Amino acid sequence: MCTPPGNPLAGPEAGRHSDGVEANDRGLRADGTIAREGSLDRVGEAFVPVVAAARERIGAVFGPDRLHSAYLYGSVPRGTAVPGVSDLDLQLALHHPPGPAERADATALEAALDAAFPQLDGVGILLSGRDELLSPSQRYDAGFFLACLCTPLLGPDLAERLPRYRPTSLLARETNGDLARLLPGWRRAAAEAATGAERRALARRVGRRLVRTGFALVMPRWGGWTSDLERSAEIFGHCYPQRAGQMRLAAATARRPAADPAALGPLIEDLAPWLADEYAAVHGVPLRSR
């Protein structure tokens, strides 16, 4: 088993989560399955009006004919969001697959929420069809994401129709095993980014994904789940000390992204290719990538 130095159970995951159960300090229920992260009760005071506005505006923009349910994820429902630094992350489940009209409405809503609340540094809205989220092909990817990493905000909870998940190699392979597929797009985006805002958005996206992938690589050995970036980097670094510094850099980049294009070079050109190869060697290639 791979454990971080000091107390291996010290962390923010313990306590009552949004599914109403107690989780231990590795984010697990008593039966060893992964507890749902976050809760509306954990939302910090500065972000309470943000969440209330998001709920109201999502309902008004999409309406019951298009929207099945809406969810929060990320630092806001985990209670770790920092005013002026953190963004707001939302997942919308639609009755039908999203089209151009839904994507345009989501983009406009992102901009409106971001402009209305100075405590936010960006808003991101994911759109998915309800049937896709519940499909067998997405059981260990989008399904896991919704069931364990998303907090219900509006509408019926789709997690009630999904299984419980354990920190296994199968979960690691299917939920974070496609890093190699992302690398060409990251390289193009880095070359084409023309503004500081575009570079910061890319840096945040790259940093987050690398830390998530690095943690998922060692997750079955560690025997638990966390989405905390710093803790994820620490756990990874204990298992791969030769890459610990780069993973700490990825976590710092995700938290406070820089507009300097040179800052992404070591992450995209060195850490990411190594991580993709190591991941495939340890867990294999996701079924959807074969």
Image (spheres, rainbow, N blue to C red):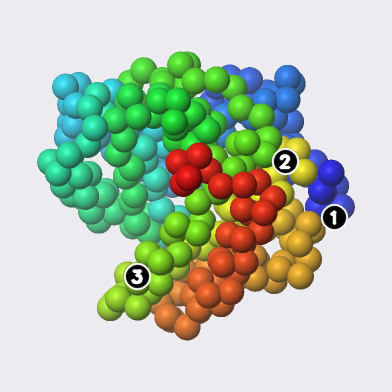
Give the residue number, with chain letter if any, for mark 3. Answer: 189
The residue depicted at 53 percent of the width and 43 percent of the height is 286
Give the residue number, with chain letter if any, for mark 1. Answer: 5
The residue depicted at 57 percent of the width and 52 percent of the height is 212
Foreground: 220 or 20? 220
Whether residue 39 is visible, yes or no, is no
Residue 9 lies left or right of residue 284; in this view the side is right
In the image as oriented, which residue stretches furthest toward the left?
101
Q: Circle 3 sits in a helix, a strand or a loop, which is it? A: helix
Q: Circle 2 sits in a helix, a strand or a loop, which is it? A: helix
Residue 61 lies left or right of residue 88; in this view the side is left
Q: Circle 1 sits in a helix, a strand or a loop, which is it? A: loop
Residue 232 at x, y percent in the picture:
66, 52
Looking at the image, residue 193 lies above or below residue 127? below
Q: Which mark is residue 263?
A: none
Q: Earlier in the sequence, mark 1 or mark 2?
A: 1
Spatial distance from mark 3 to mark 1, Cα to Cα? 37 Å
In the image as oriented, which residue stretches furthest toward the right?
6
The residue depicted at 71 percent of the width and 68 percent of the height is 243
Disc 3 marks a residue whose amino acid type is Ala
Q: Badge 1: how crowded within 10 Å, few (<14), some, or many (20+)?
A: few
Q: Which mark is residue 220?
A: 2
Eye-nearest disc, 1 or 2: 2
Examine the image and state in which quarter residue 128 appears: top left
Eye-nearest disc, 3 or 1: 3
Looking at the image, residue 63 lies above or below residue 86? above
Residue 198 at x, y percent in the picture:
32, 70
> The N terminus is located in which quarter?
top right
Looking at the image, residue 161 lies above or below residue 201? above
Disc 2 marks a residue whose amino acid type is Pro
